[in-house]
Each structure stands twice: as structure tokens, then as C-alpha cells.
Image (cartoon, rainbow, N blue to C red):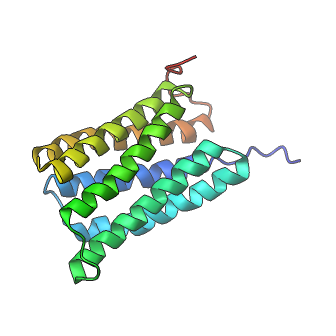
Amino acid sequence: MSDKPQSNPAVVGLAGFGGTTLLLQFHNLGLCGAGSVFWAAIFFGGLMQLVAGLQEFKTGNNFGYAAFSTYGAFWMALGGCLIGTQYGILKISTVEIGWFLVVFTLITCIFFIGTLKQNGMVAFLFLTLLLGFICLDLSFLGGMPVFTIVAAIDLIICALTAWYLMAHGIFTQFGWDLPVGKAWLK
């Protein structure tokens, strides 16, 4: 065994999740196009989180493994939906995107329940993610586009929370301890 501290793959996954989520919300608010979202979804949110998930597996962190791998695959699939729609390859309707989002809403609900015994900041991250997915479900399936704007604001908070947790993981290495709060359930 080495005395060298083990690296924390969560910081890479949180960077990719936060960055790609933030960029997609800028797109949802009309501040940027879909091209940058596509490339970020494939590489930054998708590939980086998948790698982080596989590294979490090596550390024995089942939650990190499942969450980062799941959302890495989500971003890659969403990137595929964007490119497919752009080029008419298996065009995807608004309703189909809505059901795609419902699947991840349900998965996120399970992850959220799993966070209740972790620190408060992780629980808050998954709560905002769950609320964002619910708003997007209402927008895409309920025909209420105003919920895309509500989701964008909520998911910007989610993305910044991910980066706060990333900073916590990085700064801990230097002896700085950003507060993350107590578990919501004991």
C-alpha cells in the first residue's frame, strides 16, 4: 500500500456535469446555440462523467459509479438526439424527448433518495436536478414551455452546486474545508 492519498474521481465528474448542465441551460435561455451543447454533451458531460464513474467503481463507491456513469450516458444520448435531429437521422419528436427525460426523472428520484444520508450539499444537488427534470417533463410532455425557463434557472443552481462540490473535493486536498452540510436523514 502506498502512503500517497488516492485521487477523487468525483471532481472530474462534477466538473463535466456542472459545465455541461450550465451550457445547456444557457442554450435553453437562448444565450448560445446547440453546437457547443452537442460537443460538451459528448465529451465534457458524457465522456468525462463516464470515466469518472469507472474510476469511482475502482474506489468501491457504488453511488458515484452509478451516478456518474448514468449521467455520462445521459449526456452522450442527448448529444445523439441533438445530432440526429439536426441531420434528420432518426428524428426525435418533442414527445419522444419528453419520455426520454421522464426515464431520467425516475432514475434521478432514486438517486435523490440515496443522497438523503449523504451530506446536505449532495442532497441539494440531486433535489435541484430532480426538480429540473420534472419541469422539463412538464415542458415537453405537458406543452408548457414556460417550464423550460423555470428548469433552466433551477438547473443553473444545480450546475453551480456541482461546481461547489467539485471545489470542495479539490480544496480539501490543500487543507481547505468548504462546508457541505449534514445529512438530511440520519
In the displayed structure image, the side of residue 85 where residue 19 appears, left or right: right
Instruction: List the single residue furthest toward the right.
Output: 1
- Residue 137 coordinates in the image, percent (x, y): 25, 48
Kindly indicate the quadrant of the structure image that contains residue 163.
Answer: top left
Kindly indicate the quadrant of the structure image that contains residue 172.
Answer: top right
Q: Nearer the viewer, residue 176 or 113?
A: 113
Q: Residue at x 44, y 67 (%)?
A: 43
- Residue 52 coordinates in the image, percent (x, y): 58, 55
Residue 40 at least partly seen: no
How many numbered callouts?
0
Q: Residue at x 34, y 64 (%)?
A: 78
Q: Residue at x 59, y 55 (%)?
A: 53
- Residue 164 coordinates in the image, percent (x, y): 43, 37
When the figure is inspected, residue 176 is found, relative to residue 24, above or below; the finding is above
In the displayed structure image, the side of residue 170 where residue 152 appears, left or right: left
- Residue 186 coordinates in the image, percent (x, y): 58, 16
When the figure is inspected, residue 17 is found, relative to residue 114, above or below; the finding is below
Residue 2 at least partly seen: yes
When the figure is inspected, residue 114 is found, relative to residue 184, above or below; the finding is below
Q: Residue at x 26, y 61 (%)?
A: 97
Instruction: List the single residue furthest toward the top.
Output: 186
Q: Nearer the viewer, residue 179 or 65?
A: 65
